Image (cartoon, grey):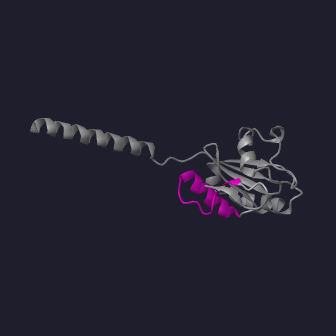
Amino acid sequence: MRRTRFLRDCLLALAAMGFVLLASARTLPRPATVQFVWMGGNDCPPCVAWRAQQLPKLEKTEIFESITFSYVPKTIKSSVPPRFFLPESVKPLKDKLDAASSGRTGSPQAAVVVNGEVFDYFFGARSAEDIEEMLRAARDGTRYPFPRCVKLLAGGRGCAVTG
């Protein structure tokens, strides 16, 4: 009787250890695939300024080498452009960007996409330093420096779904 209970307890302990090992193997941190999509055009003064002043700084960072950057020209009065006008790297994201933007117009609009999903969607120009910090956190799975929005409110300013 004691021997049977001892063997059962050993088998249960081994099974528990196996589950712990499997669970930890699935949660090992891995660098994520990150894409930064910037949408704005020449009719938008903050967009032009960001491309001239902040983008060159961002391009010189270590994080920029490890992500995909996509520039999407769009006018202030347009929402996410039709698929036909999107760069090849952005076309697969069209439906997700439409959903995240809620069809809102205005510029600049930007999205941080992690493993093919919208991780953060925002309006406005941010500094190269802020974006570098955002991209690093998204890639490495560390604390994100801003409140995240994965879906904007359709009728006005604000976020409908936070991350």
Q: Is residue 55 left or right of residue 42?
A: left
Residue at (83% x, 59% y) in the render: 48
Measured along the vertical axis of the image, is residue 43 above or below residue 8? below
Measured along the vertical axis of the image, is residue 11 above or below residue 38? above
Q: Of 152 and 61, which appears nearest the observer?
A: 152
Q: Of 51 and 113, which appears nearest the observer?
A: 113
- The image position of residue 62, as x and y in percent, is 61, 55
- Quarter of the image with the N terminus is top left
Q: Is residue 158 left or right of residue 49?
A: left
Q: Is residue 16 left or right of residue 109?
A: left
- The image position of residue 38, as x and y in percent, is 75, 52
Total numbered labels placed on residues in the image = 0
Magenta stretch: includes residue 143: yes
- The image position of residue 69, as x and y in percent, is 70, 48
Q: Tell me which corner region of the image, top left, top right, bottom left or bottom right, holds residue 46.
A: bottom right
- Quarter of the image with the C terminus is bottom right
Residue at (17% x, 36% y) in the render: 7
Q: Tell me which corner region of the image, top left, top right, bottom left or bottom right, holds residue 157.
A: bottom right
- The image position of residue 18, as x and y in percent, is 32, 39
Q: Of 58 and 20, which appears nearest the observer?
A: 20
Q: Tell me which corner region of the image, top left, top right, bottom left or bottom right, holds residue 159.
A: bottom right
Q: Which residues are magenta?
A: 127-151
Measured along the vertical axis of the image, is residue 129 above or below residue 138? below
Q: Residue furthest right?
A: 43
